Image (spheres, rainbow, N blue to C red):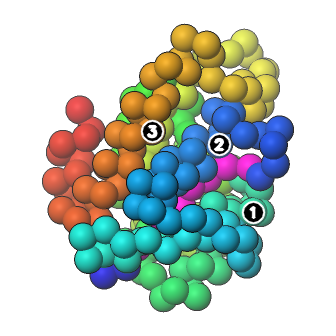
């Protein structure tokens, strides 16, 4: 059984450790925990790791957030992975900081990375792990907010939350989405 794990973010040092790049941070943690490393391949940084007999193909698209679907579509075809075995790691303004929500399908909810995946990968039938980043920004400042680092009071909590996301992914690929949602979506 193989899975495509997609960490969403933007490439470049100016985007490192921003709210919008939490998907990259989670992918890095997962691959690090499983002893892997990333290579720069077609449209993405790519790693292949194993966990309890499951093969995890982990990508961080190099297409920038708004074109993430291009990389996801390519790697789904290249690896012959069905949409139900795709898990996208993404930031979510609608959830309070640190709240995790695993969903098996759904709309993009205005997230440009998810919209691109929806448009280029045949719909909404893929799982996504939404990481709450809160919506604590003045009207009209959403872009500045998501492209800024986490606040100083949030930063100490990040390592534990990112580790919890890695555990959620391991659960997703071993016990399946239903049990994972029961345990983690509290």
Assign the C terminus to one quadrant of the image. Answer: top left
Q: Which of the numbered marks, if any, corresponds to residue 15?
A: none
Quadrant in which residue 148 is drawn: top right
Question: Which percent across, then down, holds residue 144?
Answer: 79, 26
- Is any part of residue 95 visible from this angle? no
Q: Secondary structure at mark 2?
A: helix
State how many labels appear.
Answer: 3
How crowded pointer 1 is (Cα within 10 Å; few <14, some 14-19, many 20+) is rated as: many
Where does label 2 land, which residue? Answer: 21
Where does label 1 land, which residue? Answer: 62
Choose between 114 and 98: the one closer to the eye. 98
Check residue 7 for magenta coloring: yes
Q: Measuring 61% from the left and 70% from the top, which residue is drawn there?
A: 46
Question: Which percent across, then down, holds residue 33?
Answer: 41, 54
How crowded pointer 2 is (Cα within 10 Å; few <14, some 14-19, many 20+) is rated as: many
Q: Is 83 above or below relative to 178? A: below
Q: Is residue 140 left or right of residue 50?
A: right
Q: CA distance from mark 3 to mark 1?
A: 21 Å
Choose between 47 and 4: the one closer to the eye. 47
Q: Secondary structure at mark 3?
A: helix
Where does label 3 land, which residue? Answer: 162
């Amino acid at each position: 059984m193989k899975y495509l794990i997609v960490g969403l973010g933007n490439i470049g040092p100016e985007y490192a450790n921003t709210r919008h790049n939490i998907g990259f941070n989670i992918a890095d943690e997962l691959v690090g925990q499983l002893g892997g490393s990333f290579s720069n391949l077609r449209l993405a940084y790519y790693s292949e790791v194993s966990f309890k007999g499951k093969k995890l193909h982990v990508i961080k698209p190099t297409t920038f957030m708004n074109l993430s679907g291009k990389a996801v579509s390519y790697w789904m075809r290249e690896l012959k992975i069905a949409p139900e075995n795709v898990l996208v790691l993404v930031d979510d303004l609608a959830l309070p900081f640190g709240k995790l929500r695993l969903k098996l399908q759904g709309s993009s909810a205005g997230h440009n990375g998810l919209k691109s995946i929806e448009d280029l990968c045949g719909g909404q039938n893929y799982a996504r792990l939404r990481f709450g980043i809160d919506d604590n920004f003045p009207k009209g400042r959403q872009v500045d907010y998501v492209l800024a680092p986490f606040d100083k009071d949030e930063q100490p909590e990040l390592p534990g939350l990112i580790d919890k996301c890695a555990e959620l992914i391991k659960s997703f690929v071993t016990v399946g989405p239903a049990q994972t949602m029961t345990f983690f979506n509290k």
